[in-house]
């Protein structure tokens, strides 16, 4: 007769203690497995969040680069954008809608970056790096005309931000241009 069979038949104390010990070891091991699984999941979530931030940052920059490429690769669009920023009324009846649509898409990109920075799906430095570009164009007379006509198409949080003070936040090169215009 084997020792295990004798344990079952005669109900010896020693094997039950071994079963209790084995049960305790299994509980400890299963607890460790749960802890390791939680740590692994936490790392995966952190990596997923980092990937999301990277993707959002890349998407934001790509949107701005794509917009910039589209406008600057077409000399007429570049002229309409530049002229419209200075004086919307100097554009003709065909150029004005183009300018308004360019501004709409341009500032929707900034709105998107701003809103993503608010909900922290993109790092705050992505907005900070683009903020001065936004302010520089926001202050142009052409944009002010556009904004007065179309600000209702933007998120109220972005509107509130856009209408807050930005006096010292222009790009340095634009401040020099504005100073020379006033001289």
Image (cartoon, helix red, strand yellow):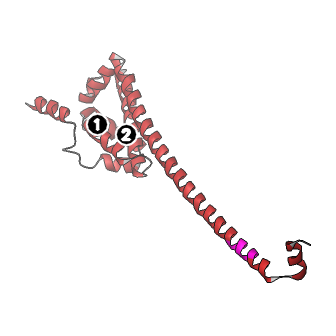
Do tag 1 and tag 2 residues touch (Cβ < 8 Å)?
Answer: yes
Decide whether the magenta segment is chiefly helix, strand or loop.
helix
SS under mark 2: helix
- Along the line of sight, which residue is nearer the eye, 122 or 96? 122
Does residue 2 belong to the magenta stretch? no
Q: Position of residue 176 (x, y in %)?
A: 14, 32
What residue is shown with label 2? 110
Say if residue 172 shows up in the picture.
yes
Query: Residue 115 at what x, y percent from top left?
Result: 41, 47
Q: Residue 143: image x %, image y %? A: 29, 35
Residue at 30% over, 38% down = 134
Can you say which quadrant of the picture contains the N terminus?
A: bottom right
Left or right for 167, reference 128: left
Q: Is residue 92 visible?
A: no
Tag 1 residue: 133
Answer with the quarter of the image where residue 74 lies. Answer: top left
Spot occupied by residue 86 in the image (x, y as percentages of width and height)? 23, 28
Q: Which residues are magenta?
A: 18-24
Name the element at disc 1: helix
Q: Which image quadrant: the C terminus? A: top left
Closer to the camera in the image, 120 or 87:
120
Query: What residue appears at the point 50 percent right and 48 percent down from the top-left corner?
Result: 47
């Amino acid at each position: 007769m084997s020792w295990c069979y004798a344990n079952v038949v005669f109900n010896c104390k020693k094997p039950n203690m071994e079963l209790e010990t084995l049960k305790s070891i299994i509980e400890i091991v299963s607890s460790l497995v749960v802890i390791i699984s939680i740590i692994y999941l936490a790392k995966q979530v952190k990596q997923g969040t980092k990937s999301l931030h990277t993707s959002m940052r890349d998407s934001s920059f790509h949107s701005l680069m794509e917009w910039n490429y589209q406008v600057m690769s077409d000399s007429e669009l570049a002229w309409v954008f530049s002229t419209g920023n200075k004086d919307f009324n100097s554009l003709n009846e065909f150029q004005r809608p183009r300018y308004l649509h360019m501004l709409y898409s341009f500032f929707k990109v900034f709105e998107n970056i701003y809103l993503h920075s608010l909900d922290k799906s993109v790092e705050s430095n992505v907005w900070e790096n683009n903020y001065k570009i936004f302010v520089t164009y926001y202050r142009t007379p052409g944009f002010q005309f556009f904004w007065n006509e179309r600000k209702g198409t933007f998120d109220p949080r972005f509107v509130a931000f856009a209408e807050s003070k930005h006096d010292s936040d222009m790009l340095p090169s634009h401040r020099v241009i504005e100073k020379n215009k006033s001289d």
